[in-house]
């Protein structure tokens, strides 16, 4: 960052703000993405800006679910492209899952910018939304998907999802793994597995969990993961610290 000293107490938070602003300036992130980021910041603050035990449990369950999926896909929007493009590419390689651009705020130009951002960070191929395949149960731009990607998938990793599409994907019988700092959001409550953590911290841990499982020659199913109980633990952590 240009003018913030590394020892500034809010350095990491300010670095992420700068990354999101850079994403907007590069045409990757929408202006609405700034507001969504601010909401995430607020929840992260309430969570003490750390990865909690409930997030680690969700990451272990997510690694298991995604590694067992027949056709996992990684859905990328403008916020995550700005924050974690390199790790999305690493996840795609580790999991052998395609990256697919899918955004809420309609813009062909931004879809292309997100694709280019992923290619610049080492992706070989990026699937794009198409009018050849549409998701059921949803009206927004996010219904347009790639026939060989999200449309065909049995499991989707979609950090910072919106509630409507999450519900639609679940109704279509697909498993959804999301990352959302708000344990009370509709997405959090609808997803199969919700990792309540900042995507910046959660993604490297998810990649580690998948790589660790590969080294061990197969992972073990985490015992009794229950998404709603896990979300209750996240909400309790917020209340214990701040009410
Ligand atoms: O690029 P687009 O058009 O697809 O737009 C992307 C956004 C994120 C703007 C869009 O999907 C949106 O409006 O999302 P929402 O409905 O505001 O939901 C965003 C959720 O992500 C909120 O619950 C935030 O708390 C959460 N969030 C924001 N930043 C982070 C986060 N969760 C994890 N890590 C973050 N860094």
Image (tube, rainbow, N blue to C red):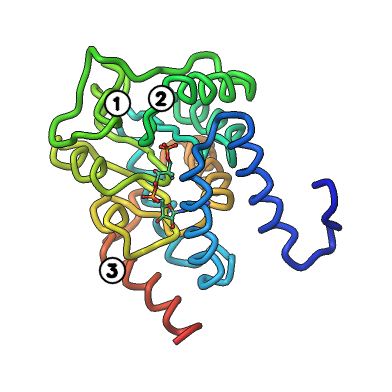
Could you say which is closer to the camera, residue 41 or residue 108? 108
User: Which residue corresponds to mark 1?
Assistant: 150
| Pointer 2 local density, CA inside 10 Å: few below 14, some 14–19, many at least 20 | many
Using the image, tell me which numbered label, if any, was put on residue 229. Answer: 3
The picture quadrant where one finds residue 10 is: bottom right
Could you say which is closer to the camera, residue 30 or residue 115? 30
> Is the residue at mark 1 in contact range of ligand 1, meaning its CB lies under 8 Å from it?
no
Name which residue lies at 36% across and 64% down.
Answer: 183
Q: Position of residue 13 (x, y in %)?
A: 66, 58
Tell me the distance, in whole angstroms, between the alpha carbons under discs 1 and 2. Answer: 7 Å
Name which residue lies at 27% across and 23% down.
Answer: 144
Could you say which is closer to the camera, residue 227 or residue 178? 178
Q: Secondary structure at mark 3?
A: helix
Using the image, tell me which numbered label, if any, was put on residue 100. Answer: 2
Q: Secondary structure at mark 1?
A: loop
Name which residue lies at 45% across and 35% down.
Answer: 77
């Amino acid at each position: 960052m240009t003018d913030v000293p590394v020892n500034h107490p809010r350095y990491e938070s300010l670095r992420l703000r700068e990354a999101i602003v850079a994403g907007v300036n590069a045409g990757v992130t929408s202006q609405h993405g700034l507001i969504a980021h601010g909401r995430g910041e607020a929840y992260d603050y309430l969570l003490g800006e750390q990865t909690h035990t409930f997030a680690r449990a969700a990451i272990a369950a997510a690694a298991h679910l995604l590694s067992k999926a027949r056709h996992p896909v990684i859905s990328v929007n403008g916020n995550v492209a700005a924050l974690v493009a390199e790790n999305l590419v690493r996840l795609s390689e580790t999991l052998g899952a395609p990256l697919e651009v899918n955004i809420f705020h309609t813009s062909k130009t931004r879809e292309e910018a997100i694709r280019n951002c992923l290619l610049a960070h080492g992706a070989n191929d990026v699937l794009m939304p198409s009018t050849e395949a549409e998701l059921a149960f949803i009206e927004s731009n996010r219904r347009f998907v790639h026939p060989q990607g999200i449309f065909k998938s049995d499991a989707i990793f979609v950090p910072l999802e919106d509630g409507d599409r999450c519900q639609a994907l679940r109704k279509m019988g697909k498993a959804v793994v999301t990352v959302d700092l708000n344990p009370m959001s509709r997405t959090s409550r609808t997803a199969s597995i919700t990792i309540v953590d900042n995507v910046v911290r959660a993604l490297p841990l998810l990649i580690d969990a998948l790589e660790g499982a590969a080294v061990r020659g197969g992972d073990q199913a985490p015992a009794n993961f229950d998404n709603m109980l896990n979300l209750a633990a996240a909400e309790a952590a917020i209340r214990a610290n701040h009410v």
